[in-house]
Image: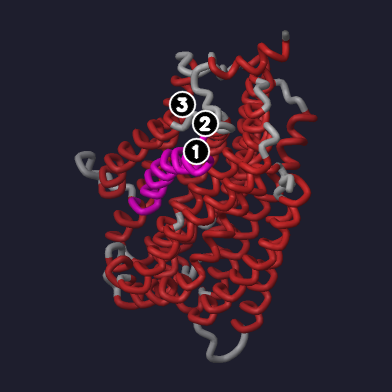
Amino acid sequence: MDTNIEVEAPSAPRGVHDMTQGKPRAHVVRVMLFILAGMAIQTLYGLIDIYWVGRLGKEAVAAVAVSSNLMFVSLAATQMLSVGCVALVSQAAGRKELGEVQRLFNQVQSLATWAGALFLVLGLALHRTYAERLSGDAMTAELASSFLLAFIPALALQFTMVGLGSALRGIGDMKPGLVAQTASVLLNMVLAPFLVFGWVSGRPLGVFGAGLATLLATAAAVVGLAVYLLRGKTFLRLRLADWQPDLATWRKLVAIGLPSGAEFLLLAVTMGVIYVVTRPFGSEAQAGFGIGLRLMQAGFMPAVAISFSAAAVVGQNYGSGAYARVRETALESVKLVLGFMLFFTLICQVFPAPLVALFSPAPDVVAAGVDYLQVTSWGYFASGIVFVCAGVFQGLGNTWPSLAASGARAVAFVLPVLVLSARPGFRMHTIWLVSVCTTLGQLGLQQILLRRELALKAPVSP
């Protein structure tokens, strides 16, 4: 009798979406569209900052670009939290263990709160040192330090955002996160020019105002999600009594998410190396790279959205033992991402200059951004597949192989770039060539590891 009750339970709670039935492609697309909409809104944060700050000069653009690299450090930690949460929650939902889903939800919120507080303290303590080490000149460093004073608290709040959103994603409830992000980005769009240029108040805050707008908008999104949960719109409940740390659960969350978090940390290190070796080229080059990077991140939203979607769909089907559906989900996700990435590659090859010029008309900045986009776009299809397959690893609950491929790529990229940067005649163009070659190598290694993982965890009967 108990078993029968567990099987029927998912039909009652609000917000739970069973992805173990129906076509996997349809589930991937449904979840992807929600995530993509949310990511598009989130990416607007960065583009809005660059757009308004671009009116303050190239040093301000470079300052925001340098500061934003710290976002990858935050993403490393929040990705660790997110991957562990989605994997465990989706698998528990696939097994129809809704009580376990509830318990995991509150444990994730507890871990997110502590991790966010630690990030805030460390970030504020080291923000000036960070700005001075990566900036190309003293003015850029000063502006970056000012921006970080507001931007770091905003990144700390992202821990709470991710903790709430990941659990909802694990059960397939995508709407709350999208609504919260939409409201927050609209608020950011309204606040940014008023705070940056001092409209109405007559007290312009410059780059600090851009960071403050992001902080206030992020705080509003967190409050919105908390209100959604407190009003009982889903069966998940915030219960502070359940926040007492369960170290066994925390270890399990970290064990699954750590490799994915480490992948983002490797990305942060890689970006840091790029900023260090490009310092001699000046703020114009760093600004051009920063704009190109933001545009690339915007173009990669579909790939990341499909990756997150695949993780949730694979997780539920793996938890229910539907191994053929796990493989079908992986294949359909790769097909989807190839279409998006080929289109984005075409855009970067044909229209790179107008895209960069939207954020800075300076010829040197545009030239640096165009070179970055035109060269690196040749590897976008490979990067898209890498993202999607990383999501499959997440759904299977083993992200170590994905980390191995990313680690190999980081070593293969960083070492040659450091060596080449010390030689006469070194150009930024060389960095992007090395990036494309190492991304192709990462794709090859990852595919070998994925085939092995699927054979072990999702065997299909002949």
Q: Residues within 10 Å of mark 1 (few under 14, many from 20)?
A: many
Question: In what element is the residue under mark 2?
Answer: loop
Whether residue 352 is in magenta: the answer is no
Residue under numbered circle 2 = 172
Closest to the observer, 163 or 198:
163
N-terminal-most mark, 2 or 3 = 2
**From mark 2 to mark 3, how far is it between C-alphas?**
15 Å
**Residue of label 1:** 27
The type of residue carrying mark 1 is: His
Where is mark 3, residue-wise? 225
Could you tell which of marks 3 and 1 lies nearer the N-terminus?
Answer: 1
Cα separation between marks 3 and 1:
23 Å
Q: Tell me the amino acid under the disc marked 2.
A: Gly
Give the label, 2 or 1, closer to the camera: 1
Residue 435, horizontal then vertical, whole percent: 56, 73
In this view, the mark in front (2 or 3): 2
- Which residues fall within the magenta stretch? 22-48
Residue 54 visible to an observer of this rendering: yes
Marks 2 and 1: CB-CB under 8 Å? yes
Q: Is residue 36 magenta?
A: yes
First in sequence: mark 2 vs mark 1: 1
Query: Of 133 and 41, which appears nearest the observer?
Result: 41
| CA–CA distance in space, label 2 to label 1 | 9 Å
